[in-house]
Amino acid sequence: MKGSIIAFGGKGGVGKTTTAAMVLRRLIATGVKPILAVDADPNATLALTLGIEGSDTIADLRERMGEAAQSPSEISKTRLMDQWLAELLSEHTGFDLITMGRPEGPKCYCYVNGLLRRYLSLLRNNYACVLVDCEAGMEYLSRLVIDDVEALILVAEPTPIGLTTVQRMSELADSLDLNVKRRILAINKVGLPGVPASDAVKAPEIDGIDQVVQVPFDTDLAGRCARGEPVDEQAGDSAAGPIADIAALALGLQAPSA
């Protein structure tokens, strides 16, 4: 399991980052640590959701390194990149966090991205696992040279549009030529006011999905999100059981509720 990737995907607003934060807390509580958390969503709210201060991002570093690549220096560019990247790691109890930041933009950063991929490839082996909060498109997985994903957790609301989006994301993962060992569908906010229960609990027929976990709508989590409060170890009591199931399934274990 060491260095294995657990990736989260889902369109904005479905609770992807909240789910990722809760699974992170659950993994640490069960002894899976240290974990490298990678916020690969340009919206970059994982730190806020976890209640920690954010740091500079890879995007900021990319700009610095792009300038440094044009200037002579006694320090090799590889060593300089390693040093700057190490400074970006935000250390916390049980996990470290690194934030990708905005997309690359119009400039070419092929050289810088090559150094970045080398660093992250080496870095991941220092952790029990790597948890990646992806953007909806998940292209960062291929940019990070992550071609082997232990578990891809697709988060969707219990609506036809939500489940159709997940189907497309699963197909996108195939197009990125990723080796995904298991795909878990987390149907989030089941029981959400205004969504009929009969629609929420229908078993979706989505190609490639190995397990489906239904996560109930949780008023505590909804309130924390509305107030901008962090997801800590006490958050989301009614969702705790399904989150534990997702964490176990992501590791290839039997779900506690099974």
Image (cartoon, grey):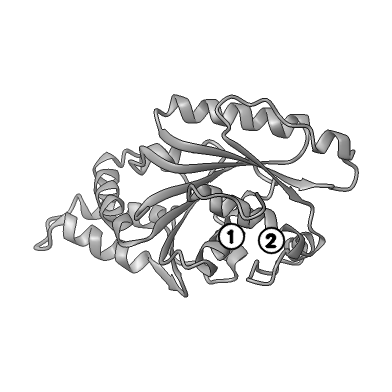
What is the CA distance from the residue labelled 1 to the residue labelled 2? 12 Å
Task: Look at 54% across and 69% down and name the residue there.
Answer: 29
Task: Look at 70% across and 32% down and name the residue there.
Answer: 163
The residue wearing badge 2 is 240
Task: Look at 47% across and 75% down and name the residue there.
Answer: 93
84 over 161 or under it: above or below: below
Three-letter amino acid code of the residue under disc 1: Ala
Left or right of residue 77: residue 36: right
258 over 47 or under it: above or below: above
Q: Secondary structure at mark 1?
A: helix
Residue 1 placed where, x, y %?
37, 52
138 over 160 or under it: above or below: below
Residue 156 visible in the shown view: yes
Residue 67 placed where, x, y %?
26, 53
The residue wearing badge 1 is 21
Q: Nearer the viewer, residue 234 or 139?
A: 234
The quarter of the displayed image where residue 34 is located: bottom left
Q: Secondary structure at mark 2?
A: helix
Q: Earlier in the sequence, mark 1 or mark 2?
A: 1
Three-letter amino acid code of the residue under disc 2: Ala
* Count of number-bearing discs: 2
Label 2 Cα crowd, 10 Å radius (few <14 / some 14-19 / many 20+): some
Q: Nearer the viewer, residue 209 or 130?
A: 209
Q: Nearer the viewer, mark 1 or mark 2?
A: 2
Task: Look at 48% across and 43% down and name the residue there.
Answer: 151
Left or right of residue 173: residue 229: right
Residue 109 placed where, x, y %?
30, 42
